[in-house]
């Protein structure tokens, strides 16, 4: 896919409407994790340096098209200014007189943030009239929010048809990383898919088996595949009604030359709680009163041996209940080894759901080639879907 970036556009004295994802974790009106804010700094720096008059669009929470003071973006200003090292102005609406006044007064190199776009029903409806109202305040549209680009909303898709579109550096970085992971990867390719249910990841799994050489399954979804093969999984989390779907995925994988790696041994408990007594059992012979909560040491070694020659790794989901120690051991061991191999040339891309938290817990998050903070967008990309916000960037 070809698209312009902010490097390809004359920004001097231009009003840039930039879609960012500032839907950040917060408590008591204070930002508790600035990762998404910090990642926008290279784009912000470039826009400032090149004389753009930047107006940022974002959402926060789910105000359902209503003005909700508790979901105002005003509280973000201190965190934005500290991260970006510049004054950030604020307009109490994203359209209308207040937005227009701020847009007109903004000087080259200055940054402003407009109020929550989801305070208007036209945002999620991608209403043409609302798109036009937003577009009044811009000369150029920049999307630097991959994480919301799976939504065809006014600020993620509609604006790209009214103003010359370009990708910010974060969007460009994300798209390049994803391209190197699945679209044009160095082979062999391995994918780790963990989590509790296959019912929520059927399309992901079907897409992955067409694109990777090894599909490593962990968590509850692995139990469903083991059950489909006739294994005894005891009290383990298992979607027994999805056995036929699991068989269909395994058959499809075999036809595509993709080897599915399932747990050989499992760490089991009788109840999930910190400090619970645990035992290691054959993953196909788990006692009726026990449940698998993590992969065992034989499984870890099996996975590492099978994938030792892989050049690319895509990771989505933990191998077990990593939130409770010591049942993070399996996820941690694989994450640490992936980080080590990345230093030796492996291309490793991870994202979605609990993945980032699991890799942070393992102390490996900084050593991966790329970590995506996008949740739903990352999963839809894994499914092979076209993301509306990304597709719109290539329209002109």
Image: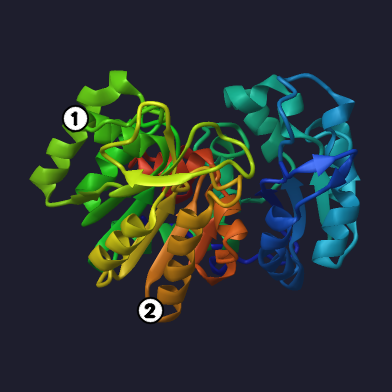
In the shown orientation, is residue 329 left or right of residue 55? left
Q: Secondary structure at mark 1?
A: loop
| Rendered image quadrant of residue 206 | top left
Q: CA distance from mark 1 to mark 2?
A: 39 Å
| Rendered image quadrant of residue 110 | bottom right
Quadrant placement of the N terminus: bottom left
Q: Residue at x 73, y 20 (%)?
A: 65
| Label 1 sits on residue | 230
The 10 Å Cα crowd at callout 2, few under 14, some 14 to 19, many 20 or more, is few
* Residue 345 image label: 2
Q: Secondary structure at mark 2?
A: loop
In the shown orientation, is residue 150 left or right of residue 115? left
Q: Does the rendering let one see residue 15? A: no
In the shown orientation, is residue 187 left or right of residue 50? left
Q: Nearer the viewer, mark 1 or mark 2?
A: 1
The 10 Å Cα crowd at callout 1, few under 14, some 14 to 19, many 20 or more, is few
Colouring style: rainbow
**Residue 157 location (% of width, % of height):** 53, 38
Query: Toward the viewer: 190 or 288?
Result: 288
**In the rendered view, would you say 61 is above or below 264?**
above
| Rendered image quadrant of residue 81 | bottom right
**Residue 10 location (% of width, % of height):** 62, 66
Earlier in the chain: of badge 1 and badge 2, it is 1
Q: Residue at x 38, y 79 (%)?
A: 345
**Residue 6 location (% of width, % of height):** 59, 63
**In the rendered view, would you say 4 is above or below 197?**
below
């Amino acid at each position: 896919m070809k698209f312009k970036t902010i490097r390809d556009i004359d920004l001097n004295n231009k009003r840039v409407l930039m879609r960012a994802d500032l839907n950040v974790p917060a408590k008591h009106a204070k930002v508790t994790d600035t990762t998404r804010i910090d990642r926008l700094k290279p784009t912000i720096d470039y826009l400032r340096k090149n004389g753009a008059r930047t107006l940022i669009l974002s959402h926060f929470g789910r105000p359902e098209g209503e003005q909700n003071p508790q979901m105002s973006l005003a509280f973000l200003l201190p965190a934005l200014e500290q991260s970006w090292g510049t004054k950030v102005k604020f307009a109490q609406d994203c359209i209308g007189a207040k937005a227009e006044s701020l847009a007109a007064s903004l000087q080259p190199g200055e940054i402003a943030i407009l109020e929550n776009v989801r305070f208007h029903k036209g945002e999620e409806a991608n209403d043409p009239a609302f798109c036009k109202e937003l577009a009044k305040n811009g000369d150029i549209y920049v999307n630097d929010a991959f994480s919301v680009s799976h939504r065809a909303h006014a600020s993620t898709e509609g604006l790209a048809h009214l103003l010359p579109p370009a990708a910010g550096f974060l969007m460009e970085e994300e798209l390049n990383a994803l391209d190197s992971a699945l679209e044009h990867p160095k082979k062999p390719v391995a994918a780790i898919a963990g989590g509790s249910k296959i019912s929520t990841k059927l399309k992901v799994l079907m897409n992955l088996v067409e694109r990777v050489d090894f599909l490593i399954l962990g968590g509850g979804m692995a139990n469903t595949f083991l059950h489909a093969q006739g294994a005894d999984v005891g009290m383990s989390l298992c979607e027994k009604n999805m056995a036929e779907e699991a068989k269909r995925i395994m058959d499809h994988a075999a036809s595509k030359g993709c080897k599915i790696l399932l747990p050989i041994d499992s760490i089991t408990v009788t109840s999930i709680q910190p400090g619970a007594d645990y035992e290691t059992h054959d993953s196909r012979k788990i006692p009726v009163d026990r449940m698998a909560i993590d992969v065992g040491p034989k499984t870890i070694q099996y996975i590492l041996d099978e994938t030792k020659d892989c050049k690319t790794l895509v990771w989505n989901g933990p191998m077990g209940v990593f939130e409770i120690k010591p049942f993070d051991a399996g996820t941690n061991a694989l994450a640490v080894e992936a980080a080590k191999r990345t230093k030796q040339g492996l291309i490793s891309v991870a994202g979605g759901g609990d993945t980032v938290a699991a890799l942070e817990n393992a102390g490996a998050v900084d050593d991966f080639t790329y970590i995506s903070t996008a949740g739903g967008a990352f999963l839809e990309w894994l499914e092979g879907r076209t993301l509306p916000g990304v597709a719109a960037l290539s329209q002109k």
